[in-house]
Image (cartoon, rainbow, N blue to C red):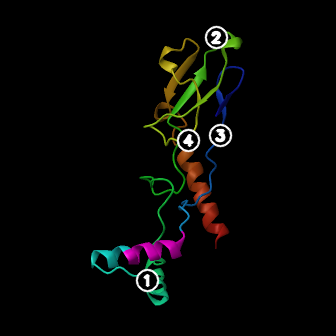
């Protein structure tokens, strides 16, 4: 979300739907169920059809807990935990009628995950009332990276 002053200059940016945590988000895993599934799969490949023993499950759990669970979001190339989401800035034209200012919510696969909402004008190329700019072309293009890094540093401080 972008807020402009009365002259149309950007004064405030914020991430509405994707809050910064500074931490990698992991998919919840029921380790006991996953351990049993992994053991059964190995046994079946060997032609053995039995229920895993508690000792086998405990041994498998020790192996599994040495690895991190799958992440909810793909890793960012810069190594910062939170996803970079500011790719484009949609601006309402100064000369457009205010009655045409309508912020829509939509998903935009394959560019963004199905569950992630985008806000603005989906068919911006056809819009007479909005302009689109790439964040990479703006003077403050590196701002999101700095904010994401600060969030990650804060999380590291919080967890000691």
Query: Vertically, is 79 above or below 145?
Result: below
Q: Mark 1 points at which residue?
A: 52
Q: Are marks 3 and 4 in contact (CB under 8 Å)?
A: no
Q: Are marks 1 and 3 in contact (CB under 8 Å)?
A: no
Which secondary structure lies at badge 3? loop
**Whole-number angstrom distance, CA of label 4 to CA of label 2:** 28 Å
Q: Name the residue under label 4.
A: 116
Q: Which quarter of the rendered picture does the C terminus lie within?
A: bottom right
Q: Do the residues labelled 2 and 1 touch (CB within 8 Å)?
A: no
Q: Quadrant of residue 44?
A: bottom left
Total label count? 4
Point out residue 110 in the picture as x, y percentages from the top left corner: 42, 37
Which secondary structure lies at badge 1? loop
Q: Which residue lies furthest to the front in this view?
A: 49
Query: Vertically, is 124 above or below 31?
Result: above
Closest to the observer, 30 or 144: 30
**Whole-number angstrom distance, CA of label 1 to CA of label 3:** 50 Å
Magenta region: which residues?
30-40
Residue drawn 58% across the image and 37% down it: 117
Q: How packed is label 4: few (under 14 Cα within 10 Å), some, or many (20 or more)?
A: few
Closest to the observer, 107 or 9: 107
For residue 96, the mark is 2
Task: State which mark lies toward you, 4 or 1.
Answer: 1
Task: State which mark lies toward you, 2 or 1.
Answer: 1
Q: How packed is label 3: few (under 14 Cα within 10 Å), some, or many (20 or more)?
A: few
Q: Earlier in the sequence, mark 3 or mark 2?
A: 3
Q: Earlier in the sequence, mark 4 or mark 2?
A: 2
Residue drawn 55% across the image and 43% down it: 115
For residue 14, the mark is 3
Residue drawn 60% across the image and 49% down it: 147
**Whole-number angstrom distance, CA of label 2 to CA of label 1:** 68 Å
Which secondary structure lies at badge 2? loop
């Amino acid at each position: 979300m972008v807020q402009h002053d009365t002259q149309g200059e950007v004064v405030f940016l914020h991430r509405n739907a994707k809050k910064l945590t500074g931490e990698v988000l992991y998919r919840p895993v029921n380790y006991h169920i996953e351990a049993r599934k992994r053991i059964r799969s190995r046994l079946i490949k060997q032609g053995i059809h039995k229920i895993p023993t508690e000792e086998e499950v405990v041994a498998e759990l020790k192996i599994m807990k040495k690895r991190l669970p799958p992440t909810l979001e793909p890793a960012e190339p810069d190594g910062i935990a939170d996803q970079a989401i500011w790719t484009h800035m949609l601006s309402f034209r100064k000369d457009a009628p205010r009655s045409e200012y309508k912020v829509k919510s939509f998903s935009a696969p394959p560019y963004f995950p199905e569950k992630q909402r985008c806000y603005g004008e989906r068919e911006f190329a056809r819009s007479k009332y909005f302009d689109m700019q790439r964040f990479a072309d703006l003077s403050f293009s590196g701002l999101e990276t700095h904010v994401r890094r600060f969030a990650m540093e804060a999380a590291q401080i919080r967890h000691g």
